[in-house]
Image (spheres, rainbow, N blue to C red):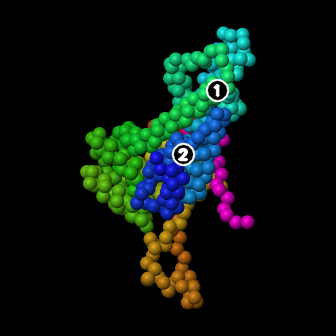
């Protein structure tokens, strides 16, 4: 197995260079991040006590580097926080099982002190988390997990006369291996969910797209492509207007893919959105990230489309996998809402070289080429994720099931200098 630090350095270089040839979109970035953190966890040695703390510190150390390498790719931070949440949840599950075992043994034996020595020592964080969980209202996902856990045979603590230090160390070591095993299994499930998010979202297309409708989208999104194609596969007949998404014209690529799959597709300019919106039944777009308040960081131009949809009472639907759900708010200093791309996408430097030369004495020409827009939640009608459709006001509750409050801020490494 390759060294973890080598894997980390390779992925850091890809993030810093925005290597599109190897990382295409947020889904691929999220999946690679989860796979890297799985390697970090599998090769991390855990002590006899505070195993969860050791894993959390290892993941957080790597996560700080990944987030700092490309702050605008919020999917990286999302996955780092998801994995931290998984570690805490698995540690809490083992702690709860150990506490149950302590209660059973105390009722059946009078020698409490000896049995307390034989059972694994629980970390203070795990005990506190267990106490908090009794006060927190359970979510549907938690209830389902509890039901499945209750069906498993109860754990019985080993009873024997010998309570020597070697047996206790073996027991603690086995609990550490159990924690790592459970965490890795949960991360594997996370990777599987990321890999199948397109299919899970596309399965819901038939519920939202009907015959003879006109759908408007902007730019290129694989999630939107699979969603529209899934509706066609269910014998839905509809038309698609694709705004080209200048200056990178990703809409041309989406329109070509849709036409190749047999959908009736029309390409329009971005400036024609307001002129065409009155003919549209629904706007369906992808997202770069979904914030905790229900706001959307999306490709540039989508705020204009959302305003046009609101003006004409057209539903504005956002498709996003759960790896794009960010627990931060837009005003958080950790959130980088935008980045500027090269001016060469807008202008030919050869033709405008005189205007850009400040030494000529003429007025200078500046070019601003932002990558993203921010769409406030009031302009969004519905979110469709791999867990179903949700109103913008419900997103904060959905996000709360994926992240721990202790992990919302993953500090960046300080910049070098005095």
Q: How far apart are marks 1 and 2 (CA)?
A: 28 Å
Residue 74 x, y percent position in the rendering: 54, 52
Q: On the image, which quarter does residue 107 sit in?
A: top right
Which residue is painted at 44% across and 71% down in the image? 345
Q: Which residue is drawn at the image coordinates 28% and 42% (left, top)?
A: 233
Comparing 270 with 350, the one in front is 350
Q: Farthest residue in the bottom direction?
A: 360
Residue beneath label 1, please?
166
Q: Is residue 284 above or below residue 109?
A: below
Q: Mark 2 points at which residue?
A: 40
Residue 138 shown left or right of residue 224 in the figure: right
Spot occupied by residue 221 in the image (x, y as percentages of width and height): 40, 53
Q: What element carries label 2?
A: helix
Whether residue 223 is visible here, answered yes or no, is yes
Q: Position of residue 261 (x, y in %)?
A: 27, 51
Classify mark 1: residues with Cα within 10 Å, few (<14), some (14-19) or many (20+).
few
Give the residues drawn in magenta, as a range.
402-418
């Amino acid at each position: 197995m390759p060294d973890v630090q080598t894997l980390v350095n390779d992925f850091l270089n890809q993030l810093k260079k925005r290597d599109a040839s190897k990382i295409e979109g947020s889904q691929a970035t999220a999946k690679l991040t989860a796979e890297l953190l799985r390697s970090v966890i599998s090769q991390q040695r855990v002590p006899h006590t505070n195993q969860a703390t050791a894993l959390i510190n290892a993941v957080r150390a790597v996560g700080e580097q990944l987030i700092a390498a490309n702050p605008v790719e919020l999917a990286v931070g999302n996955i780092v926080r998801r994995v931290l949440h998984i570690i805490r949840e698995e540690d809490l599950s083992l702690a709860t099982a150990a506490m149950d075992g302590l209660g059973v043994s105390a009722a059946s034996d009078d020698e409490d002190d000896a049995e307390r020595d034989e059972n694994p020592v629980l970390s203070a964080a795990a005990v506190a988390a267990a106490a908090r969980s009794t006060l927190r209202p359970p979510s549907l996902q938690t209830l389902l997990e509890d039901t499945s856990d209750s069906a498993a045979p109860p754990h019985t603590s080993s009873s024997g006369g010998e309570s020597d230090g070697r047996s206790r160390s073996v027991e603690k070591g086995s609990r550490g291996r159990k924690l790592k095993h459970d965490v890795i299994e949960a991360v594997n499930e996370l990777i599987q969910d990321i890999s199948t998010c397109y299919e899970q979202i596309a399965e819901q297309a038939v519920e939202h797209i009907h015959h003879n409708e006109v759908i408007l989208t902007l730019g290129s999104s694989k999630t939107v492509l699979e969603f529209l194609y899934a509706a066609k596969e269910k014998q839905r007949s509809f038309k698609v207007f694709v705004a080209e998404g200048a200056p990178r014209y990703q809409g041309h690529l989406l329109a070509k893919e849709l036409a190749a799959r047999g959908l009736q597709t029309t390409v329009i300019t971005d400036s024609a959105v307001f002129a065409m919106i009155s003919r549209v039944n629904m706007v369906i777009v992808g997202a770069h990230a979904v914030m905790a308040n229900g706001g959307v960081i999306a490709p540039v131009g989508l705020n204009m489309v959302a305003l046009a949809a609101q003006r004409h009472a057209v539903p504005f639907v956002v498709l996003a996998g759960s790896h794009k759900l960010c627990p931060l708010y837009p005003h958080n200093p950790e959130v980088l809402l935008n980045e500027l791309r090269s001016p060469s996408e807008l202008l030919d430097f050869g033709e405008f070289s005189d205007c850009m030369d400040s030494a000529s004495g003429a007025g200078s020409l500046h070019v601003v080429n932002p990558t993203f827009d921010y769409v406030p939640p009031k302009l969004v009608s519905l979110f469709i994720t791999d867990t179903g459709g949700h109103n913008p006001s419900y997103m904060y509750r959905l996000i709360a099931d994926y992240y721990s409050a202790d992990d919302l801020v993953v500090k960046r490494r300080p910049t070098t200098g005095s």
